[in-house]
Image (spheres, helix red, strand yellow):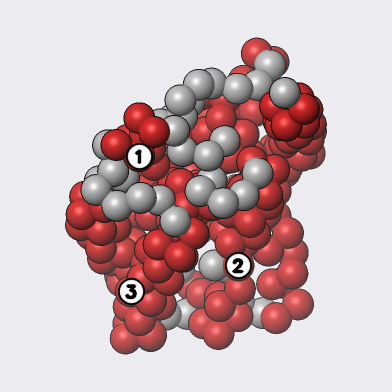
Amino acid sequence: MNPTSSERSTSRRSPSVWMGLLLYSGYLAIFFTTWTVNGVDYQRIGESVETTKLWYALPTSFGCAFLVVAISMLGWWRIALFEETRSGPAWVWLLPVVIAGVILNNFLGLQADQLSSELLLWSTLGAVGVGFGEEMITRGSMIVGLRSRFSEVRVWLLSTALFSALHVPNVLFGLPLPEMPFQVLFTFIFGSGMYVIRRLSGTLILPMALHGLWDSSLFLSVSTGVEPSAAQFAVYPLAIVCAIVMLLKTHELERVARSL
């Protein structure tokens, strides 16, 4: 699934792996520098208005500002946000529906009397920042770059591995080391689900929205003293199944294309 001539013609700079990695590195440099300056304690993110603002909303907003400028200069908006065609069986739409259901359940379980206007403001900005920023650097610009060189199955593997990798530095900011492998595993599975939803819907916009709302519903649960519903864990086995189905179909299409 390499970029077509029509896709390349809309870009000011041809897609490449190194450019995708540059955007990925630039976003993370800004994000983790902000965390360092603000003295983040990972275990306390979202517990108050101040931690939501300094450790959630601001780092992602600064990173997103960088991406908006960079993507505009490269002319990659269309190829980063949209697929040429949609892929996947109709039943795979169950995945985004279940994710949306978990998000809604988390929001409905919040203690309304603990939600201030300030907390909602910074949580919303953080949700936009996470949804746009993390999706754009891994399943947006990175996919664009990887498709210039690799098969689609490798594009999934590398872009999702990089999504997991961006969570590894959390151990430097307070995440207990024994928890890190589990976070990396779960983010790899969740990232695979977001990849499936991009291919299925034909756009990165839906994964951006779901990712941002997912994170925000979890952070707001912490802020209001509510334990997020265990229903969230139903997403992971479903994401695995959907990813396997999507990748098997992709591999078969690539095999047929090579034989022609």
Q: Secondary structure at mark 2?
A: helix
CA distance separating discs 1 and 2: 29 Å
Residue at (54, 67) in percent of width and height:
166
Q: Which residue is mark 2?
A: 165
Image quadrant for the N terminus? top right
From this viewpoint, which residue is outermost toward the top?
A: 90
Placement of 22 over or under 191, stated as above or below: below
**Residue that sits furthest to the front in the current view:** 260
Amino acid type, label 1: Arg
At label 3, which amino acid type do we have? Ile
> What's the distance in space between the residues labelled 1 and 3, CA to CA?
28 Å
Q: Nearer the viewer, mark 1 or mark 3?
A: 1
Q: Which residue is mark 3?
A: 30
221 over 84 or under it: above or below: below
Residue under the point 40% across and 62% down? 19
Side of 151 where 209 appears, left or right: left
Percent x, y for residue 244? 78, 35
- Callout in the foreground (1, 2): 1
Residue 174 visible at all: no
Local secondary structure at mark 1:
helix
Task: Tell me what residue is drawn at x 61 percent, y 73 percent.
Answer: 168
Question: Mark 3 Cα within 10 Å, few/some/many (few <14, many 20+)?
Answer: some
- Disc 2/disc 3 C-alpha distance (Å): 16 Å
What percent of the width, then of the height, locates residue 157? 68, 52
Q: Which residue is mark 1?
A: 8
